């Protein structure tokens, strides 16, 4: 059968033509923001998929994981030795290996957050102005010391050994806390994680409110992204940032009205199907001997990290 596709559609564009006049363009701020939001949404989808893998950590009872997570977070906050924090980091890394989660992608996020909130925030504590002690690296030397209100500024500002220990300890606390939080998030689906908090006698109503808020934020982000892309597809050429901000701001009321209408219809559908205000979540499997053994091992490790 003879093809009816026009010949010009079957011809490849010359490579020189494709590259001619091409320049690296900086995307507007809203483009970058929505692109990052889309990546975050994809990460949420992938998190739900990765939580269903048949790895050792993913198959554990969510109650066991939640109890272990809270216990280890307390241990990380109590431990005041850099050596113990390093051992905790090695232990968490071993858990990642057992979970089958992509270590490189997760630890990129961990390092970024730990650098921002565990190093940059506490970096001034390494100076002798805040933590006096043995000098490691001299930085600035003044003609004389100064007294500013209740703060004493010495003649020589330097990085001290006790200050480096304090910054390292705080950095590893943030690093280990974020690592544990992401391990729990990537190995447990959000609904099962919420239901696991029932072991602490959290009411079902509160858990349902958290779950609906999570879903609402997720759907609202998707609606905003779809609305913005629909508007952008009708534009020709590059539009300035302030114009895009005006367009998106003008759609806020429409998005809110649409979301309110959708959820009112959803609630009406729930009432028509017999909803009476009582929430009953599905029960998770009860803890077995294996779960108690794991909790006992985690408790022993926590005591080891404290007293080492």
Image (cartoon, rainbow, N blue to C red):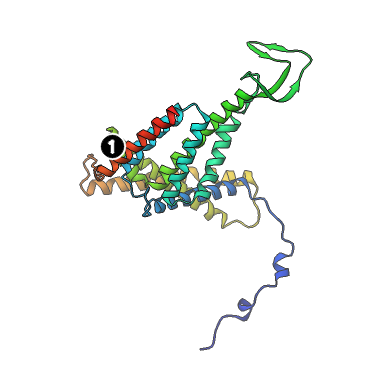
Q: Is residue 252 visible?
A: yes
- Tell me if residue 194 can be seen: no
Q: Which image quarter is the C terminus in?
A: top left
Q: Report the side of 155 relative to 307 (left or right).
A: right
Judging depth in this view, the residue of 143 and 1 nearest the camera is 143
Q: In this view, does 280 lie to the left or right of 95?
A: left
* Residue 235 percent location from the top left of the image: 60, 56
Residue, x 61% and y 45% (percent of image)? 29
Q: How many labels does the image show?
A: 1
In front of the other: 125 or 213: 125
Above or below — where is 99 with respect to 295?
Answer: below
Determine the residue located farthest toward the right in the rendered image: 143
Residue at the front extreme of this rendering = 308
SS class, disc 1:
helix
Toward which corner of the image does residue 143 lie, by quadrant? top right
Q: Is residue 105 above or below residue 236?
A: above
Residue furthest out toward the bottom: 1
Label 1 packing within 10 angstroms: few (<14), some (14-19), many (20+): some
Name the residue nearer the viewer: 279 or 271: 279
Residue 231: % across, % down: 54, 53
Up/down of 289 relative to 129, above or below:
below
To which quarter of the image does residue 126 belong?
A: top right
- The residue beneath circle 1 is 198
Q: Where is residue 305 in the image (x, y as percent from the top left)?
A: 43, 31
For the point 28% across and 37% down, the residue is 198
Q: Where is residue 89 in the image (x, y as percent from the top left)?
A: 49, 38
């Amino acid at each position: 059968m003879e093809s009816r596709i026009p010949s010009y559609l079957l011809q490849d564009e010359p490579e020189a033509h494709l590259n001619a006049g091409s320049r690296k363009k900086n995307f507007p701020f809203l483009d970058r923001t929505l692109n990052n939001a889309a990546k975050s949404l994809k990460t949420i989808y992938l998190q739900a998929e990765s939580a269903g893998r048949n790895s050792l950590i993913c198959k554990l009872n969510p109650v066991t994981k939640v109890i272990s997570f809270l216990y280890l977070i307390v241990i990380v906050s109590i431990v005041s030795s850099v050596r113990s924090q390093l051992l905790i980091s090695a232990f968490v890394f071993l858990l990642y290996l057992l979970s089958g989660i992509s270590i490189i992608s997760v630890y990129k996020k961990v390092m970024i957050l730990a650098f921002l909130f565990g190093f940059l925030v506490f970096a001034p504590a390494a100076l002798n102005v805040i933590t006096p002690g043995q000098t490691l690296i001299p930085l600035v030397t003044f003609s004389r010391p100064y007294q500013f209100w209740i703060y004493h500024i010495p003649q020589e500002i330097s990085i001290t050994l006790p200050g480096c220990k304090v910054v390292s300890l705080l950095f590893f606390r943030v690093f280990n806390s974020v690592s544990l939080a992401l391990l729990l998030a990537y190995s447990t689906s959000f609904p099962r994680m919420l239901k696991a908090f029932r072991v602490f006698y959290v009411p079902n109503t509160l858990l349902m409110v958290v779950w609906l808020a999570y879903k609402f934020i997720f759907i609202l982000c998707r609606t905003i992204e779809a609305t913005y892309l629909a508007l952008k597809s009708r534009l020709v050429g590059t539009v300035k940032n302030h114009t895009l901000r005006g367009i998106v701001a003008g759609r806020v009321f429409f998005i809110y009205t649409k979301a309110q209408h959708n959820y009112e219809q959803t609630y009406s559908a729930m009432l028509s199907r017999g909803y009476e205000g009582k929430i009953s979540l599905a029960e998770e499997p009860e803890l077995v001997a294996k779960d108690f053994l794991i909790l006992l091992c985690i408790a022993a490790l926590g005591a080891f990290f404290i007293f080492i």
